[in-house]
Amino acid sequence: MARAIGIVVIGRNEGDRLKACLGSVIGSGPVVYVDSGSSDGSRDYARSLGVDVVELAVPPNFTAARARNAGAEALFASVPDIAAIQFVDGDCEVQPGWMATGAAALEADPGLALVFGRRRERHPEASIYNALCDDEWNVPVGEVGACGGDILIRAAAYRAAGGYPDEMIAGEEPDMSMRLRGLGWRLARIEGEMTLHDAAITRFGQWWRRTQRAGHAFAELAWRHPDSHDPDWQASVRRDLFWGLAMPAWALLGLIGALFKPVLIVIPIAYIALFELNIMRIARLRARRGLPPRLARAGAVLLMVGKIAEFTGIFSFHRQRLAGRKATLIEYKGGAR
């Protein structure tokens, strides 16, 4: 693209991950780093590289959406005619050549609001959770309904959509994606290596928290976009209510009832059978996509168990909404490494 591409990096206590991130974008265009209350020296390190640093204050609550918007505004203030923005999370490293690849795709298709490439996990071998994140990032090439956090977006499209919703603690990227599409823009995953991501999920508790956050996002997206069918957030919520609440409650009631009427033991047995059949079905589908059998099976198990975690996220969203309280970040990382 003829005009400059600006880079917005967001982070909170990312430590060495942030150093790798900033090192991957310095020299590619004007860089803004937005910090959400780090205590690990991130701000000082960014300034030592000559990077423009924006420090978010509280209140309001920290959110990735608010950080990205603040970074974009800082870019617009310093480079008013910026052509596009590369948003990147501070736990990601931008791959060589990506921004040129993304810019060429935007140049070739004026109808594209944004593009993203292949995001890979840095240490998929470290845990089953990291390996499944790597599979999650492997979105098929072509037009998509929603994007993630790492994108190259036209400044004009970002402005037309009004940016991200500051208050959303999760799901802000699909929310903006839906508004962009409502304005007639298209979104695409293109060929090319984009970023190397470090999920750093090595414990079940971390995975559970991340999955809770996904449920919170599903609930808020369904509430904000009740008529959406692509993606169908209402359907996602219904699945979580069925497998994460109704079915476990049915099995528990059957188990309790069996203490008084032994024949009712058939209810939890039926639940276990249905649970396993669904795991087998999902594992087969994942294996057909090329996942190794062990990873396909593990992913299916976690997907089903995760329905309970997602339900707790749904419950949390509506409880806070009805109480008139603002949601706070659901964090799953342990900070700098």
Image: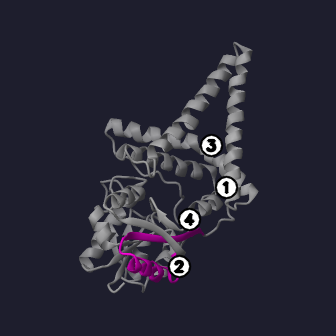
Mark 4 or 3, nearer chain start: 4
Query: Which residue appears at 35% of the width and 65% of the height?
Result: 185
Residue that badge 1 annotates: 286
Marks 4 and 3 in Cβ contact (< 8 Å): no
Which circle's residue, 2 or 1, is located before the other in the chain?
A: 2
Residue 230, given in percent of the width and then of the height, sits at 44, 52
Could you say which is closer to the camera, residue 59 or residue 313? Answer: 313
Q: Dot 3 corresponds to which residue?
A: 305
Q: Which amino acid does label 2 sit on?
A: Gln
Evaluate if marks 2 and 4 touch, with contact meaning CB atoms under 8 Å apart: no
Which circle marks residue 95 in the picture? Answer: 2
Image quadrant where one finds the N terminus: bottom left
**Of callouts 3 and 2, the N-terminal one:** 2
The answer to whether any part of residue 221 appears in the image is yes
In this rendering, position of residue 318 left or right of residue 132: left
The residue lying at 38 percent from left, 63 percent from top is: 36
Residue 304 in the magenta stretch? The answer is no
Give the residue type that dot 1 points to. Arg
Q: Residue at x 55, y 43 (%)?
A: 309
Q: Which of the numbered marks, if any, corresponds to residue 261?
A: none
Q: Identity of the amino acid at label 4?
A: Pro
Tell me if 25 is positioned left or right of 126 in this view: left
Dot 3: element: helix
What x and y, as percent, mark residue 131?
Answer: 65, 61
Specify the segment rendered in magenta.
94-121
**Residue type of the residue flagged with mark 3:** Val
Secondary structure under the numbered disc 4 in the rendered image? loop
